[in-house]
Amino acid sequence: MGSIAFVRWVLGWVEFQIRPRRKGACERFLNLCARQGVALWRIGRSEELFTAAIAVGRYEDLRPIAKKAGVRLKSGKRHGLPFLWKRISSRKGILAGMVVFAVTLHVFSLYVWSVQVTGNTSIPSERILTEAKNMGLSPGALKSRLEYQELQRRLMIAFPDVSWLSVNTQGCMIEIALEERIKHPEAEKREKISNLKASASGQIVKLEVTGGVLQVKVGDAVVKGQLLVSGVAEDTSGGTRMMRSSGKVIAETEKSLVAEIPIKQTVRRLTGKQIVRRSVRIFGLELPLSLTGRPQGEYQKESERVTLKGRTGDLPVSLYTETWKEQTQEEITLTEAQAEQQAKAKIEEIKQREWKDIKILSSNLSGKMEGNVYRMTLYCQCEENIAVESEILFKP
């Protein structure tokens, strides 16, 4: 039934009224139409007349039948594509809009709208998408310029842990489908031969050695570079056995940090004035949304790009925003208290960065002015692992 209705809509059809000139004329008209193979539908009846519908091309065939049956016909509403097209063609704006829409839709279909990765488990999708982008595959790329076999080959080389990879096209969406290799336990490799040496001077307080021959004991004082654990041992028969040294040698050490803060400094301050510039990128084409040019002078720039996302991933449309904040340079002179505060913050930053695995037993912090510089020194009594592995290399 759906296909019949569609054909009728494409060809066009018209509603009409059947008014009798004498009693029984309408029934006679319908019978004559059926005998002559004239298809009518939507047949309805009221007290005074009948209604029906017919294909627009066969409406004229009803006139001799109507004359013979003794009825009068009056056409009504017209439906279907021919009449719709007639109305649209008389409105140039709608017709132009349809053409522009069709052309735009065709042009957009030539580009990649989104790229997604499937089948990966341990390799992050972002890493694969970044590598594919470097090879020219990203939202906004022209599909006709993509060489899918070459992309597959280069991605396989870039990710050796992938057993197979395929770049598939699904309309305007590109799918990178892959399967990662099943990693089997590697055969045990020959261990390297190494010693453990002291990275700093100190007194040993604890030994946690799991490999190698100890050369020191708890309570010994050692200096930086001294051998702590040897990877070479003699067996009972006088032979030599090589091994890898491993473990920890905990020692008490002395460490110090120095921070110097100049009293006179140049700082930048924001004035509160800012300029915002925006643009939109569509299929790689950057279109400005702001008429403001790049400001001249001392400004701090902050930028953000927001990419529109669809159901299958990123779309080739993004909004870029630049915020330029005006700033001025100002010469200031710190008080001793302010310099001391900055020095403490600097020393704490260095401790967090360089002394992560060091336990501080006791500390002494001192600071003083030295000309135009505030100098702060931190002396610490620490406990740390001073064992550093040093490989023993043999020349062939």
Image (cartoon, rainbow, N blue to C red):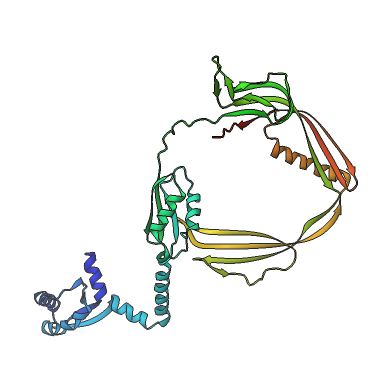
Left or right, 19 with respect to 296, comes to left
How many numbered discs, if any? 0
**Quadrant location of residue 83?**
bottom left
Q: Residue furthest left?
A: 35
**Quadrant location of residue 203?**
top right
Name above or below for residue 371 compared with residue 22: above
Pick the residue in front: 67 or 84: 84
Q: Say whether residue 21 is visible.
A: no
Q: What residue is drawn where x is 69% and y is 40%?
A: 353
Q: Position of residue 70 (x, y in %)?
A: 13, 83
Is the C terminus in the top left, top right, bottom left or bottom right quadrant? top right
Name above or below for residue 67 compared with residue 209: below
Q: Position of residue 383 (x, y in %)?
A: 72, 27
Q: Residue furthest top?
A: 236
Left or right, 371 with respect to 209, comes to right
Name above or below for residue 28 compared with residue 286: below
Left or right, 340 with respect to 182, comes to right
Q: Residue furthest front?
A: 396
Pick the residue in front: 158 or 357: 158
Pick the residue in front: 198 or 141: 198
Is the N terminus in the top left, top right, bottom left or bottom right quadrant? bottom left
Q: Residue furthest right?
A: 371
Q: What residue is drawn where x is 25% and y is 69%?
A: 6
Q: What residue is drawn where x is 29% and y is 76%?
A: 81
Name above or below for residue 272 compared with residue 382: below
Q: Position of residue 130 (x, y in %)?
A: 51, 54
Q: Position of residue 151 (x, y in %)?
A: 42, 57
Q: Say whether residue 8 is visible.
A: yes
